[in-house]
Amino acid sequence: MLFTTIIRMAAEAIKLTVLIKTLVWALCLLFLSVVYYAVIKKLEVIARVCEIYGLIIIIGYITIHLAISTQGKLINLRPFFAIADINGGI
């Protein structure tokens, strides 16, 4: 009973944040199918898939940040404080 409650709570949280128009029973069915696959094939297969996805995410993250950091000019960087704030308002 606790397991089904946890699945329902996770499905509701995903529905409220990311997949707004997705039905709760569809998310629960997806969770249960992933759990069933993990029980049949053991967790090693899912761990390998997660490692591959993690590597793809890290490489994408680095690529996007490097591409963004090459845009713009250093002259456009602004200080956080005005000169009057630093001098004490003198």
Image (cartoon, rainbow, N blue to C red):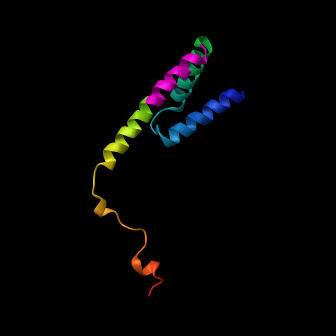
Q: Position of residue 60 (x, y in %)?
A: 38, 35
Q: Position of residue 44 (x, y in %)?
A: 58, 17
Q: Which of 59/16 is in front?
A: 59
Name the residue rendered at 68%, 27% in the picture.
Answer: 3
The answer to whether 32 appears left or right of 64 in the picture is: right
Name the residue rendered at 62%, 36% in the picture.
Answer: 9
Q: Quadrant of the C terminus?
A: bottom left
Q: Position of residue 42 (x, y in %)?
A: 61, 14
**73 vs 6: above or below:** below
Q: Which of 44/78 is in front?
A: 78
Q: Residue furthest bottom?
A: 90
| Main secondary structure of the magenta stretch | helix
Q: Position of residue 57 (x, y in %)?
A: 43, 33
* Residues rendered magenta in the picture: 42-55
Q: Is 13 part of what is drawn in magenta?
A: no
Q: Residue furthest top?
A: 40
The answer to whether 60 appears left or right of 52 in the picture is: left
